[in-house]
Amino acid sequence: MRKKTKKSNLSKLHTPPDSPDIKQKQQKKEIDFIIKRLYVYLKTHPGCIFLKKISGSCVGYYDDAEETITIDYRCDFVPTLIHEFIHHMRPKWNEKMVIREEKKVMKHLTGIQCRNILRAMVGSLY
Ligand SMILES: [Zn+2]
């Protein structure tokens, strides 16, 4: 018997709150949370970032077993790092959800946050 496919819980996760102001504040909180978790990940996983040329259309990947992120150094570093980190943080999310979150983070990321991410990343390079 073929089971009914489960509906994505994406809509549940991203139900817009009533006021756009509240929505913006909530989004900022979510993004700050992801960024803080990224700093912690980079500090607690020394040598977790690998840089190499990746062939094909892929510019980065997350290794679940090793908890490492590999980035093609010819691509946009920060969005790739954030994308792969979201895979680490939300292992059950599908690619579409990860891309959506990555875009949200990139839209709200400040220059200072970006600088701090890059600084933390340097210390985590393999
Ligand atoms: Zn992905």
Image (cartoon, grey):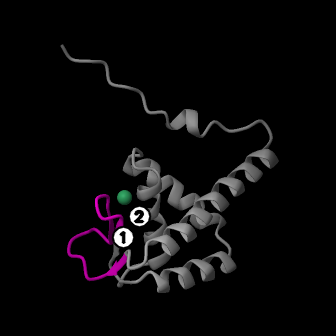
Seen as rendered, the residue at the extreme left is 1
Mark carried by residue 4: none
User: Which residue is at a point 35% across and 83% down the rendered structure image?
Assistant: 126
90 to the left or right of 71: right
The magenta segment is 49-69
What's the residue at 33%, 70% (across, down)? 60
Front position in the image: 121 or 6: 121
For image coordinates 50% across by 53% down, the residue present is: 100
Q: Of label 2 and label 1, which has the lower sequence position?
A: 1
Relative to 115, does residue 37 appear above or below in the rendering?
above
- Tell me, yes or no, whether the two marked residues, 2 and 1, touch with CB atoms within 8 Å: yes
> Which residue in the structure is indicated by mark 2?
84
Q: From the Cβ of disc 1, is ligand 1 less than 8 Å away?
A: no
**Residue 82 x %, y %:** 49, 67
Q: Mark 1 sits on what residue? A: 69
The secondary element bearing badge 2 is classed as: helix
Q: Residues within 10 Å of mark 2 (few under 14, many from 20)?
A: many
Q: Secondary structure at mark 1?
A: strand
